[in-house]
Amino acid sequence: MPNYDAIIIGTGQAGPALARRLVAAGSKVAILERKLFGGTCVNTGCTPTKTLIASAYAAHIARRAADYGVTIAGAVKVDMKAVKARKDAVVAPSHNGVERSLKMLTGCTVYEGHGRFVAEKKVAVNGSELAADRIFINVGARAAIPPIPGLDRVPYLTNSSMMDIDFLPPHLIILGGSYIGLEFAQAYRRFGSEVTVIELGPRLIAREDEDVSQAIADFLKGEGIDVRVDSKVIGVEKEGNAIGVNVESAGKISQVVGTHVLVAIGRRPNTDDLGLDKAGIATDARGYIQVDDQLRTNVSDIWAMGDCNGRGAFTHTSWNDFEIVAANLLDNDQRRVSDRITAYALYTDPPLGRAGMTEAEVRKTGKPALISTLAMEDISRANEKGETKGFMKILVDLDSKQILGASFLGLSGDEVIHCVLDIMYAKAPYTVMQRAMHIHPTVSEFIPTMLGDLKPLQ
Protein backbone atom coordinates (compact mmCIF):
# COMPACT_ATOMS: atom_id res chain seq x y z
CA MET A 1 0.00 0.00 0.00
CA PRO A 2 1.74 3.21 -1.17
CA ASN A 3 2.00 5.84 1.53
CA TYR A 4 1.98 9.55 0.87
CA ASP A 5 2.18 12.68 2.93
CA ALA A 6 -0.89 14.00 1.10
CA ILE A 7 -3.58 12.74 -1.26
CA ILE A 8 -5.52 15.21 -3.41
CA ILE A 9 -8.73 13.95 -5.01
CA GLY A 10 -9.54 16.03 -8.10
CA THR A 11 -7.63 18.40 -10.38
CA GLY A 12 -9.91 21.43 -10.51
CA GLN A 13 -8.67 24.91 -9.66
CA ALA A 14 -7.55 24.17 -6.11
CA GLY A 15 -6.00 20.70 -6.40
CA PRO A 16 -3.05 21.17 -8.80
CA ALA A 17 -1.97 24.44 -7.20
CA LEU A 18 -1.97 22.84 -3.76
CA ALA A 19 -0.02 19.86 -5.10
CA ARG A 20 2.73 22.21 -6.30
CA ARG A 21 2.89 24.01 -2.95
CA LEU A 22 3.00 20.76 -0.99
CA VAL A 23 5.70 19.26 -3.19
CA ALA A 24 7.76 22.44 -2.88
CA ALA A 25 7.47 22.09 0.89
CA GLY A 26 8.91 18.57 0.71
CA SER A 27 5.73 16.48 0.78
CA LYS A 28 5.19 13.31 -1.22
CA VAL A 29 1.87 13.82 -2.97
CA ALA A 30 -0.63 11.66 -4.86
CA ILE A 31 -3.25 13.39 -6.99
CA LEU A 32 -6.25 11.59 -8.46
CA GLU A 33 -8.31 12.49 -11.52
CA ARG A 34 -11.14 10.34 -12.81
CA LYS A 35 -11.86 12.17 -16.07
CA LEU A 36 -10.82 15.67 -17.20
CA PHE A 37 -7.73 17.41 -15.90
CA GLY A 38 -8.48 21.02 -14.97
CA GLY A 39 -12.02 20.46 -13.72
CA THR A 40 -15.14 22.37 -14.67
CA CYS A 41 -13.62 25.77 -15.41
CA VAL A 42 -11.16 24.58 -18.02
CA ASN A 43 -13.31 21.90 -19.67
CA THR A 44 -17.01 22.72 -19.40
CA GLY A 45 -17.23 26.04 -17.56
CA CYS A 46 -15.49 29.39 -17.75
CA THR A 47 -12.98 28.87 -20.54
CA PRO A 48 -15.16 27.14 -23.15
CA THR A 49 -18.37 29.04 -22.42
CA LYS A 50 -16.73 32.45 -22.52
CA THR A 51 -15.05 31.43 -25.78
CA LEU A 52 -18.47 30.57 -27.21
CA ILE A 53 -19.84 33.86 -25.91
CA ALA A 54 -17.01 35.70 -27.68
CA SER A 55 -17.99 34.07 -30.99
CA ALA A 56 -21.63 34.97 -30.38
CA TYR A 57 -20.64 38.56 -29.62
CA ALA A 58 -18.71 38.75 -32.90
CA ALA A 59 -21.80 37.62 -34.79
CA HIS A 60 -23.95 40.14 -32.93
CA ILE A 61 -21.60 43.05 -33.68
CA ALA A 62 -21.32 41.99 -37.32
CA ARG A 63 -25.11 42.19 -37.63
CA ARG A 64 -24.97 45.66 -36.07
CA ALA A 65 -22.14 46.82 -38.31
CA ALA A 66 -24.33 49.41 -40.01
CA ASP A 67 -24.81 51.13 -36.63
CA TYR A 68 -21.09 51.91 -36.75
CA GLY A 69 -21.06 53.01 -40.36
CA VAL A 70 -19.65 49.69 -41.56
CA THR A 71 -21.19 47.83 -44.49
CA ILE A 72 -21.07 44.04 -44.67
CA ALA A 73 -22.15 42.50 -47.97
CA GLY A 74 -24.64 39.67 -47.55
CA ALA A 75 -26.08 38.00 -44.47
CA VAL A 76 -23.91 37.23 -41.46
CA LYS A 77 -23.46 33.48 -41.21
CA VAL A 78 -22.25 31.40 -38.26
CA ASP A 79 -20.27 28.22 -38.88
CA MET A 80 -20.91 26.18 -35.75
CA LYS A 81 -18.24 23.63 -36.61
CA ALA A 82 -15.70 26.46 -36.78
CA VAL A 83 -17.08 27.95 -33.54
CA LYS A 84 -16.60 24.63 -31.75
CA ALA A 85 -13.14 24.16 -33.28
CA ARG A 86 -12.10 27.58 -31.97
CA LYS A 87 -13.49 26.74 -28.54
CA ASP A 88 -11.62 23.42 -28.50
CA ALA A 89 -8.40 25.15 -29.56
CA VAL A 90 -8.69 27.62 -26.69
CA VAL A 91 -9.48 24.90 -24.14
CA ALA A 92 -6.78 22.40 -25.18
CA PRO A 93 -3.70 24.27 -23.89
CA SER A 94 -5.26 24.73 -20.45
CA HIS A 95 -6.49 21.14 -20.16
CA ASN A 96 -3.29 19.64 -21.53
CA GLY A 97 -1.14 22.04 -19.53
CA VAL A 98 -2.64 20.95 -16.21
CA GLU A 99 -2.19 17.28 -17.06
CA ARG A 100 1.35 17.70 -18.35
CA SER A 101 2.51 19.86 -15.45
CA LEU A 102 1.22 17.39 -12.85
CA LYS A 103 2.75 14.38 -14.56
CA MET A 104 6.09 16.18 -14.76
CA LEU A 105 5.97 17.39 -11.15
CA THR A 106 8.72 15.68 -9.18
CA GLY A 107 7.34 14.38 -5.92
CA CYS A 108 3.80 14.07 -7.27
CA THR A 109 2.26 10.81 -8.52
CA VAL A 110 -0.79 11.05 -10.78
CA TYR A 111 -3.48 8.38 -10.66
CA GLU A 112 -6.07 8.43 -13.44
CA GLY A 113 -9.12 6.80 -11.95
CA HIS A 114 -12.04 7.27 -9.57
CA GLY A 115 -10.88 7.58 -5.98
CA ARG A 116 -13.07 6.45 -3.10
CA PHE A 117 -12.49 6.42 0.63
CA VAL A 118 -12.23 2.96 2.16
CA ALA A 119 -11.25 4.23 5.61
CA GLU A 120 -10.55 7.52 7.35
CA LYS A 121 -7.11 8.02 5.79
CA LYS A 122 -7.24 5.49 2.95
CA VAL A 123 -8.39 6.00 -0.64
CA ALA A 124 -8.81 3.24 -3.21
CA VAL A 125 -8.11 3.90 -6.90
CA ASN A 126 -7.62 1.47 -9.78
CA GLY A 127 -7.49 -1.50 -7.43
CA SER A 128 -4.85 0.01 -5.16
CA GLU A 129 -5.20 1.49 -1.71
CA LEU A 130 -3.37 4.71 -0.93
CA ALA A 131 -2.79 6.08 2.56
CA ALA A 132 -1.82 9.57 3.66
CA ASP A 133 -1.69 11.72 6.77
CA ARG A 134 -3.52 14.52 4.98
CA ILE A 135 -6.28 14.30 2.38
CA PHE A 136 -7.74 17.12 0.30
CA ILE A 137 -11.04 16.72 -1.54
CA ASN A 138 -11.46 18.81 -4.71
CA VAL A 139 -14.09 16.90 -6.69
CA GLY A 140 -16.27 19.76 -7.95
CA ALA A 141 -19.91 19.64 -8.98
CA ARG A 142 -22.12 18.79 -11.94
CA ALA A 143 -25.49 19.72 -13.36
CA ALA A 144 -28.42 18.75 -11.17
CA ILE A 145 -31.10 16.81 -13.02
CA PRO A 146 -34.56 17.46 -11.53
CA PRO A 147 -37.19 14.70 -11.27
CA ILE A 148 -39.35 16.07 -14.07
CA PRO A 149 -41.73 13.42 -15.44
CA GLY A 150 -40.53 12.19 -18.82
CA LEU A 151 -37.16 13.93 -18.74
CA ASP A 152 -35.38 10.59 -18.48
CA ARG A 153 -37.06 9.46 -21.71
CA VAL A 154 -35.87 12.27 -23.98
CA PRO A 155 -32.38 13.39 -24.94
CA TYR A 156 -31.35 16.50 -23.04
CA LEU A 157 -28.25 18.66 -22.75
CA THR A 158 -26.34 19.99 -19.75
CA ASN A 159 -23.59 22.59 -19.56
CA SER A 160 -21.11 19.73 -20.08
CA SER A 161 -22.70 18.08 -23.11
CA MET A 162 -23.29 21.51 -24.71
CA MET A 163 -19.52 21.60 -25.17
CA ASP A 164 -19.74 18.66 -27.61
CA ILE A 165 -22.25 20.02 -30.12
CA ASP A 166 -21.04 21.49 -33.39
CA PHE A 167 -24.43 22.31 -34.88
CA LEU A 168 -27.10 24.95 -34.38
CA PRO A 169 -30.15 23.74 -32.42
CA PRO A 170 -33.16 25.10 -34.37
CA HIS A 171 -35.11 25.71 -31.13
CA LEU A 172 -33.31 25.44 -27.81
CA ILE A 173 -35.52 25.23 -24.72
CA ILE A 174 -33.63 26.10 -21.55
CA LEU A 175 -34.96 24.93 -18.19
CA GLY A 176 -33.74 27.45 -15.65
CA GLY A 177 -33.41 31.22 -15.84
CA SER A 178 -30.25 31.73 -13.83
CA TYR A 179 -26.59 32.36 -14.62
CA ILE A 180 -25.69 29.31 -16.72
CA GLY A 181 -28.99 29.20 -18.57
CA LEU A 182 -28.97 32.89 -19.49
CA GLU A 183 -25.44 32.87 -20.86
CA PHE A 184 -26.28 29.94 -23.16
CA ALA A 185 -29.62 31.53 -24.06
CA GLN A 186 -28.09 34.74 -25.38
CA ALA A 187 -25.14 33.03 -27.07
CA TYR A 188 -27.28 30.55 -29.00
CA ARG A 189 -29.83 33.18 -29.90
CA ARG A 190 -26.99 35.18 -31.44
CA PHE A 191 -25.77 32.08 -33.25
CA GLY A 192 -29.24 31.85 -34.78
CA SER A 193 -31.28 29.47 -32.63
CA GLU A 194 -34.80 30.16 -31.52
CA VAL A 195 -34.55 30.17 -27.72
CA THR A 196 -37.10 29.77 -24.93
CA VAL A 197 -36.14 30.18 -21.26
CA ILE A 198 -38.48 28.64 -18.67
CA GLU A 199 -38.01 29.78 -15.07
CA LEU A 200 -39.99 28.51 -12.07
CA GLY A 201 -39.52 31.67 -10.02
CA PRO A 202 -41.29 35.02 -10.46
CA ARG A 203 -38.23 36.53 -12.21
CA LEU A 204 -34.88 35.66 -13.71
CA ILE A 205 -31.83 35.27 -11.44
CA ALA A 206 -33.83 35.77 -8.25
CA ARG A 207 -30.62 36.21 -6.25
CA GLU A 208 -30.22 39.67 -7.80
CA ASP A 209 -32.22 42.84 -7.15
CA GLU A 210 -35.48 43.17 -9.02
CA ASP A 211 -34.24 46.07 -11.15
CA VAL A 212 -31.25 43.99 -12.28
CA SER A 213 -33.45 40.99 -13.09
CA GLN A 214 -35.87 43.15 -15.05
CA ALA A 215 -33.16 44.90 -17.04
CA ILE A 216 -31.61 41.57 -18.04
CA ALA A 217 -35.00 40.15 -19.00
CA ASP A 218 -35.66 43.24 -21.11
CA PHE A 219 -32.50 43.04 -23.18
CA LEU A 220 -32.83 39.28 -23.63
CA LYS A 221 -36.39 39.70 -24.85
CA GLY A 222 -35.16 42.51 -27.08
CA GLU A 223 -32.92 40.01 -28.83
CA GLY A 224 -35.87 37.72 -29.48
CA ILE A 225 -35.55 35.29 -26.57
CA ASP A 226 -38.86 33.96 -25.25
CA VAL A 227 -38.61 34.42 -21.47
CA ARG A 228 -41.23 32.67 -19.34
CA VAL A 229 -41.19 33.18 -15.57
CA ASP A 230 -43.59 31.85 -12.94
CA SER A 231 -43.63 28.72 -15.07
CA LYS A 232 -43.38 25.21 -13.69
CA VAL A 233 -42.25 22.40 -15.97
CA ILE A 234 -44.64 19.52 -15.23
CA GLY A 235 -43.52 17.10 -17.91
CA VAL A 236 -41.37 16.47 -20.94
CA GLU A 237 -42.27 14.21 -23.83
CA LYS A 238 -41.34 13.23 -27.37
CA GLU A 239 -43.28 15.05 -30.09
CA GLY A 240 -42.20 13.25 -33.25
CA ASN A 241 -38.63 14.34 -33.88
CA ALA A 242 -39.11 17.23 -31.47
CA ILE A 243 -39.42 17.58 -27.69
CA GLY A 244 -42.49 18.96 -25.95
CA VAL A 245 -42.12 20.71 -22.61
CA ASN A 246 -45.36 20.99 -20.67
CA VAL A 247 -45.58 24.11 -18.54
CA GLU A 248 -48.03 25.22 -15.86
CA SER A 249 -48.34 28.98 -15.37
CA ALA A 250 -51.10 30.98 -13.68
CA GLY A 251 -53.20 27.85 -13.43
CA LYS A 252 -53.01 27.13 -17.15
CA ILE A 253 -51.10 24.37 -18.89
CA SER A 254 -49.37 24.94 -22.21
CA GLN A 255 -46.69 23.23 -24.25
CA VAL A 256 -43.45 24.54 -25.73
CA VAL A 257 -42.15 22.40 -28.57
CA GLY A 258 -38.47 22.60 -29.45
CA THR A 259 -35.69 20.55 -30.95
CA HIS A 260 -33.31 20.49 -27.98
CA VAL A 261 -33.58 20.89 -24.20
CA LEU A 262 -30.84 22.28 -21.96
CA VAL A 263 -31.19 21.54 -18.25
CA ALA A 264 -29.71 24.45 -16.28
CA ILE A 265 -31.63 24.31 -13.02
CA GLY A 266 -28.75 24.02 -10.59
CA ARG A 267 -25.64 22.12 -9.53
CA ARG A 268 -24.94 19.18 -7.24
CA PRO A 269 -21.62 18.19 -5.65
CA ASN A 270 -19.72 15.15 -6.90
CA THR A 271 -19.74 13.57 -3.46
CA ASP A 272 -22.28 10.76 -3.84
CA ASP A 273 -19.71 8.16 -4.96
CA LEU A 274 -16.72 9.06 -2.81
CA GLY A 275 -17.26 6.69 0.10
CA LEU A 276 -17.41 9.64 2.49
CA ASP A 277 -19.28 7.48 5.00
CA LYS A 278 -16.27 5.13 5.20
CA ALA A 279 -14.20 8.08 6.40
CA GLY A 280 -16.91 9.57 8.60
CA ILE A 281 -16.94 12.84 6.65
CA ALA A 282 -20.09 14.88 7.26
CA THR A 283 -22.20 16.37 4.48
CA ASP A 284 -25.32 18.51 4.49
CA ALA A 285 -28.72 17.47 3.11
CA ARG A 286 -27.67 18.36 -0.45
CA GLY A 287 -24.42 16.41 -0.31
CA TYR A 288 -22.03 19.32 0.19
CA ILE A 289 -19.10 18.50 2.45
CA GLN A 290 -19.35 20.48 5.66
CA VAL A 291 -16.26 22.56 6.43
CA ASP A 292 -15.19 25.14 8.96
CA ASP A 293 -13.86 28.62 8.31
CA GLN A 294 -10.49 27.18 7.25
CA LEU A 295 -12.04 24.47 5.04
CA ARG A 296 -11.40 21.59 7.44
CA THR A 297 -13.96 18.80 7.52
CA ASN A 298 -15.17 17.20 10.73
CA VAL A 299 -12.40 14.59 10.34
CA SER A 300 -8.93 15.69 11.42
CA ASP A 301 -6.49 16.43 8.56
CA ILE A 302 -9.09 16.15 5.80
CA TRP A 303 -10.05 19.29 3.90
CA ALA A 304 -12.61 20.02 1.17
CA MET A 305 -11.98 22.71 -1.45
CA GLY A 306 -13.93 24.08 -4.37
CA ASP A 307 -17.53 23.55 -5.41
CA CYS A 308 -17.99 20.37 -3.35
CA ASN A 309 -17.90 22.28 -0.04
CA GLY A 310 -20.83 24.59 -0.78
CA ARG A 311 -18.86 27.69 0.19
CA GLY A 312 -18.72 29.06 -3.33
CA ALA A 313 -19.54 27.96 -6.85
CA PHE A 314 -16.96 29.84 -8.85
CA THR A 315 -13.44 29.34 -10.14
CA HIS A 316 -12.25 32.29 -8.07
CA THR A 317 -13.72 30.90 -4.85
CA SER A 318 -12.08 27.54 -5.57
CA TRP A 319 -8.74 29.23 -6.14
CA ASN A 320 -9.23 31.22 -2.95
CA ASP A 321 -9.93 27.94 -1.13
CA PHE A 322 -6.48 26.76 -2.22
CA GLU A 323 -4.93 30.00 -0.99
CA ILE A 324 -6.65 29.66 2.39
CA VAL A 325 -5.58 26.04 2.89
CA ALA A 326 -2.00 26.70 1.73
CA ALA A 327 -1.67 29.80 3.90
CA ASN A 328 -2.82 28.02 7.03
CA LEU A 329 -0.79 24.86 6.45
CA LEU A 330 2.41 26.19 4.96
CA ASP A 331 2.71 29.92 5.64
CA ASN A 332 1.56 30.26 9.24
CA ASP A 333 -0.97 32.78 7.91
CA GLN A 334 -4.40 32.42 9.47
CA ARG A 335 -6.70 33.02 6.52
CA ARG A 336 -10.45 32.31 6.64
CA VAL A 337 -13.36 31.86 4.26
CA SER A 338 -15.29 34.52 6.14
CA ASP A 339 -12.67 37.11 5.18
CA ARG A 340 -13.71 37.09 1.54
CA ILE A 341 -16.32 39.34 0.01
CA THR A 342 -19.01 37.95 -2.27
CA ALA A 343 -18.05 38.74 -5.86
CA TYR A 344 -19.00 37.25 -9.21
CA ALA A 345 -20.14 38.08 -12.71
CA LEU A 346 -22.86 37.06 -15.14
CA TYR A 347 -21.41 36.99 -18.66
CA THR A 348 -24.37 38.06 -20.66
CA ASP A 349 -23.89 41.06 -22.94
CA PRO A 350 -23.84 43.46 -21.25
CA PRO A 351 -22.30 41.64 -18.29
CA LEU A 352 -23.23 41.98 -14.64
CA GLY A 353 -20.46 42.54 -12.11
CA ARG A 354 -21.42 42.03 -8.46
CA ALA A 355 -19.64 42.69 -5.18
CA GLY A 356 -20.87 42.59 -1.61
CA MET A 357 -24.53 43.00 -0.69
CA THR A 358 -27.48 43.59 -2.96
CA GLU A 359 -29.86 46.49 -2.32
CA ALA A 360 -32.41 44.00 -0.98
CA GLU A 361 -29.87 42.58 1.48
CA VAL A 362 -28.91 46.05 2.68
CA ARG A 363 -32.56 46.91 3.26
CA LYS A 364 -33.02 43.75 5.33
CA THR A 365 -30.32 44.88 7.76
CA GLY A 366 -32.38 47.93 8.67
CA LYS A 367 -29.20 50.01 8.97
CA PRO A 368 -29.07 53.51 7.48
CA ALA A 369 -27.43 53.47 4.07
CA LEU A 370 -26.78 55.58 1.01
CA ILE A 371 -27.34 54.66 -2.63
CA SER A 372 -26.34 56.00 -6.01
CA THR A 373 -27.37 54.79 -9.47
CA LEU A 374 -26.34 55.79 -12.97
CA ALA A 375 -27.72 54.66 -16.31
CA MET A 376 -25.15 53.38 -18.81
CA GLU A 377 -26.65 55.67 -21.44
CA ASP A 378 -25.26 58.59 -19.41
CA ILE A 379 -21.69 57.27 -19.69
CA SER A 380 -19.68 58.61 -22.61
CA ARG A 381 -17.64 55.42 -23.10
CA ALA A 382 -20.85 53.39 -23.49
CA ASN A 383 -22.19 55.81 -26.08
CA GLU A 384 -18.92 55.77 -28.01
CA LYS A 385 -19.07 51.99 -28.24
CA GLY A 386 -22.79 51.94 -28.95
CA GLU A 387 -23.47 49.72 -25.92
CA THR A 388 -25.72 51.69 -23.57
CA LYS A 389 -27.91 49.03 -21.95
CA GLY A 390 -27.89 48.65 -18.18
CA PHE A 391 -26.97 50.73 -15.15
CA MET A 392 -24.59 50.94 -12.19
CA LYS A 393 -25.59 50.93 -8.53
CA ILE A 394 -23.51 51.42 -5.37
CA LEU A 395 -24.58 51.14 -1.71
CA VAL A 396 -22.71 52.70 1.22
CA ASP A 397 -23.04 52.40 4.99
CA LEU A 398 -24.08 55.80 6.33
CA ASP A 399 -22.12 55.54 9.59
CA SER A 400 -18.87 53.82 8.61
CA LYS A 401 -18.80 55.28 5.08
CA GLN A 402 -17.67 51.89 3.81
CA ILE A 403 -19.07 50.48 0.58
CA LEU A 404 -21.57 47.71 1.25
CA GLY A 405 -22.06 46.45 -2.28
CA ALA A 406 -22.41 47.24 -5.94
CA SER A 407 -24.19 45.94 -9.04
CA PHE A 408 -22.71 47.02 -12.36
CA LEU A 409 -24.88 45.84 -15.25
CA GLY A 410 -23.38 47.28 -18.37
CA LEU A 411 -20.36 47.69 -20.59
CA SER A 412 -17.27 46.24 -18.83
CA GLY A 413 -19.26 45.75 -15.63
CA ASP A 414 -17.36 42.51 -14.97
CA GLU A 415 -14.07 44.44 -14.94
CA VAL A 416 -15.16 47.75 -13.43
CA ILE A 417 -16.55 46.01 -10.34
CA HIS A 418 -12.99 45.39 -9.13
CA CYS A 419 -12.53 49.11 -8.45
CA VAL A 420 -15.20 48.80 -5.78
CA LEU A 421 -14.12 45.36 -4.60
CA ASP A 422 -10.58 46.49 -3.83
CA ILE A 423 -11.80 49.47 -1.80
CA MET A 424 -14.08 47.11 0.13
CA TYR A 425 -11.18 44.78 0.97
CA ALA A 426 -9.14 47.77 2.11
CA LYS A 427 -12.04 48.71 4.42
CA ALA A 428 -11.48 52.27 3.27
CA PRO A 429 -14.27 54.89 3.31
CA TYR A 430 -15.93 55.57 -0.01
CA THR A 431 -14.43 59.07 0.04
CA VAL A 432 -11.06 57.57 -0.94
CA MET A 433 -12.47 56.56 -4.30
CA GLN A 434 -14.67 59.62 -4.56
CA ARG A 435 -11.55 61.79 -4.54
CA ALA A 436 -9.61 59.60 -6.95
CA MET A 437 -8.91 60.87 -10.46
CA HIS A 438 -9.90 58.19 -12.97
CA ILE A 439 -9.02 58.08 -16.66
CA HIS A 440 -11.34 59.48 -19.33
CA PRO A 441 -13.07 58.07 -21.31
CA THR A 442 -13.79 54.91 -19.31
CA VAL A 443 -16.70 53.38 -17.47
CA SER A 444 -14.70 53.42 -14.21
CA GLU A 445 -14.34 57.21 -14.26
CA PHE A 446 -17.99 57.57 -13.29
CA ILE A 447 -17.64 55.73 -9.98
CA PRO A 448 -16.23 58.82 -8.18
CA THR A 449 -19.07 60.84 -9.72
CA MET A 450 -21.63 58.36 -8.40
CA LEU A 451 -20.07 58.45 -4.94
CA GLY A 452 -20.42 62.21 -4.96
CA ASP A 453 -24.14 61.86 -5.62
CA LEU A 454 -25.19 59.45 -2.86
CA LYS A 455 -28.74 59.69 -1.54
CA PRO A 456 -30.38 58.13 1.53
CA LEU A 457 -31.76 54.66 0.87
CA GLN A 458 -35.47 55.12 1.45
Image (cartoon, rainbow, N blue to C red):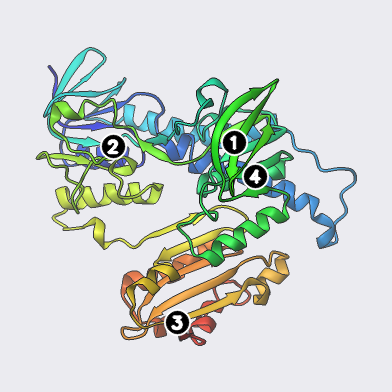
Mark 1 Cα-neighbour bin, 10 Å: few <14, some 14–19, many ≥20: many
Q: Amino acid at mark 2?
A: Gly
Q: 452 or 216, which is in the foreground?
A: 216
Closest to the camera, between mark 4 and mark 3, is: 3
Which numbered disc flags the more N-terminal residue, 4 or 3?
4
Q: Amino acid at mark 4?
A: Ala
Which numbered disc flags the more N-terminal residue, 1 or 3?
1
- The residue indicated by pointer 3 is 457
Mark 3 Cα-neighbour bin, 10 Å: few <14, some 14–19, many ≥20: some
Q: Are marks 1 and 3 in contact (CB under 8 Å)?
A: no
Q: Residue at x 46, y 70 (%)?
A: 406
Q: CA–CA distance between discs 4 and 1?
A: 13 Å
- The residue indicated by pointer 2 is 287
Closest to the camera, between mark 4 and mark 1, is: 4
Q: CA–CA distance between discs 1 and 2?
A: 32 Å
- Classify mark 2: helix, strand or loop: loop
- The residue indicated by pointer 1 is 87
Q: CA–CA distance between discs 2 and 4?
A: 32 Å
Farthest-out residue, right: 73
- Does residue 105 lie above or below 204 as drawn? above
- Does residue 250 lie above or below 195 as drawn? below
- The residue indicated by pointer 4 is 187
